[in-house]
Amino acid sequence: MSAGKEVEVLDFLGIPLWEHRGDGRVPETSGRSQDRAETPLDPGVPPPVTELGWEDLARRVAGCELCGLCRTRQQTVFGAGSRPADWMFIGEAPGADEDREGQPFVGRAGQLLTSMIEAMGLERPKVYIANVLKCRPPKNRDPEPGEIASCRPFLERQVELVAPRILVALGRIAAQSLLGTEQPISRLRGTVHTLGGKIPVIVTYHPAYLLRNPVAKREVWRDLCLALDQAGS
Ligand code: URA
């Protein structure tokens, strides 16, 4: 392991070194080649989400009123990062900071996620980050099954467009909804799952959980090493 990488890993495991580098914003790379104009044959019938390119998908999410969260959100949080990307990290739902800024993982949990990504030798702007829900649940309550179901096509389309080599599910909600299971996270960690029989999925704890339970960082590091092994294979 190079000295630089070692510092990042120690940084992640050692807790006090987390200093926020940069302004936390994730530049969007252009995915224009994948954009398609939202011009349905029948103007009364919008095209299905499965046919949307990046720009139209983002517009569809921004105007979404499929569940009650549209009444309490400040704005939708679409996702951020490189498009396409080899690595895709999927969280649960925006919190207060994300709801305010319109970007995923910009609060304290987001800073820890950045540490995790850097400890892996990756760069945050070069991965793609999205959430199961695009709107903040009030008071950060758990997402409801109906909300997850309404948002699911958006995430599925993001995964298709990003075409990652590997997915990392952050926390129980992301893992269970991606994998379509109710198994506890303790059972889901430590093995390589697949999405659609193709994309490997690694499950780990949510960074917000790590903020409350820093000792779990060692387990997370094991999960991330499994992901690195899998991506390298
Ligand atoms: N937690 C999440 O799951 N996603 C965010 O974007 C922020 C916090």
Image (cartoon, rainbow, N blue to C red):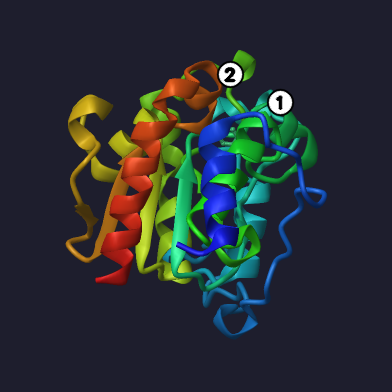
Q: Which residue is mark 1?
A: 96
Residue 33 drawn above or below residue 48: below
- Judge left or right: residue 18 versus residue 40: right
In front here: 196 or 116? 116
Residue 81: quadrant of the picture: bottom right
Q: Amino acid at mark 2?
A: Asn
Left/right placement of residue 223 relative to residue 132 reads left
Say which of 128 and 2 sits in front: 2
Q: Marks 1 and 2, Cα distance to the nearest angstrom?
A: 8 Å
Residue 173 image point, x, y percent: 38, 30
Amino acid identity at mark 1 = Ala
Residue at 77% across, 49% down = 21
Judging depth in this view, the residue of 3 and 98 nearest the camera is: 3
Where does residue 145 sit, x and y in percent of width and height? 36, 27
Disc 1 residue: CB within 8 Å of ligand 1: no
What residue is at 52 percent from the left and 73 percent from the top? 84
Sequence-first tag of 1 and 2: 1
The residue that appears at 65% across and 63% down in the rendered structure is 125
Instruction: Tell which quarter ligand 1 is in.
Output: top right
Q: Residue furthest bottom?
A: 33
In the picture, the quarter occupied by the C terminus is bottom left
Assign a secondary structure to mark 1: helix
Instruction: Give coordinates of residue 190: x percent, y percent.
Output: 21, 41
Q: Circles 1 and 2: CB distance less than 8 Å? A: yes
Residue at 58% over, 79% down: 36
Determine the secondary structure under disc 2. helix
Location of mark 2 (residue): 140
Q: Is residue 190 above or below residue 212?
A: below
Rendered image quadrant of residue 53: bottom right
| Residue 161 marker | none
Outermost front residue: 3
